[in-house]
Image (spheres, rainbow, N blue to C red):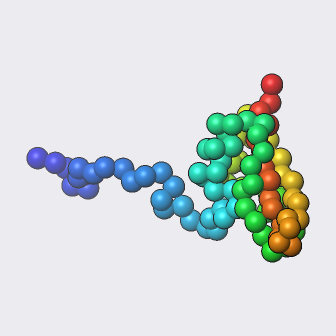
Amino acid sequence: MIPDGMKAAIPPEPYNNRKGKQPKLLTDDKVRILLSQPESWYIIGTQDKWISGVKANIESMTQRNISHLKDKGKFEIQQRKNKDGQVDIYCQFVPYE
């Protein structure tokens, strides 16, 4: 006999019920790639204009999906205008030694 309030269940995938604004530029999948290839630059997105707030949140490690990595290293962001007039956003993870 199972007590009231108890039932068999499989836990959902982590972060599926995450509330608030979700990261669009530096997503969890992109973070995994950057962590597996430290100190390698990748274009993580292209924007119509220069970014500032998102860049600051990533570099200060305040974005929710990377804040737990604050003591492991830092993300560096560079922005360069491409030949189409858009801005390519480059990112790399630099681990602390």
Q: What's the residue at 23%, 52% (across, down)? A: 7
| In-image side of 97 versus 25 (left or right) | right
88 to 34, vertically: above or below: below
| Residue in the foreground of this view, choosing between 82 and 15 | 82
| Residue in the foreground of this view, choosing between 79 and 94 | 79
Q: Is residue 53 visible?
A: no
| In-image side of 23 versus 82 (left or right) | left
**How many numbered discs, if any?**
0
Q: What's the residue at 70%, 47% (across, down)? A: 67
94 to 14, vertically: above or below: above
Q: What's the residue at 78%, 36% (across, down)? A: 39
Q: In the figure, residue 80 lies in which quadrant? A: bottom right
Q: Position of residue 84 (x, y in %)?
A: 83, 72
- Farthest residue to the top: give it: 97
Q: Position of residue 30 (x, y in %)?
A: 64, 51
Q: What's the residue at 31%, 49% (across, down)? A: 10
43 to 37, vertically: above or below: below
Q: Quadrant of the C terminus?
A: top right
Q: Position of residue 71 (x, y in %)?
A: 75, 35
| Residue in the foreground of this view, choosing between 86 and 29 | 86
| In-image side of 90 versus 30 (left or right) | right
- Farthest residue to the front: give it: 83
Q: In the figure, residue 49 lies in which quadrant? A: bottom right
| In-image side of 82 versus 40 (left or right) | right
Q: Is residue 93 visible?
A: yes
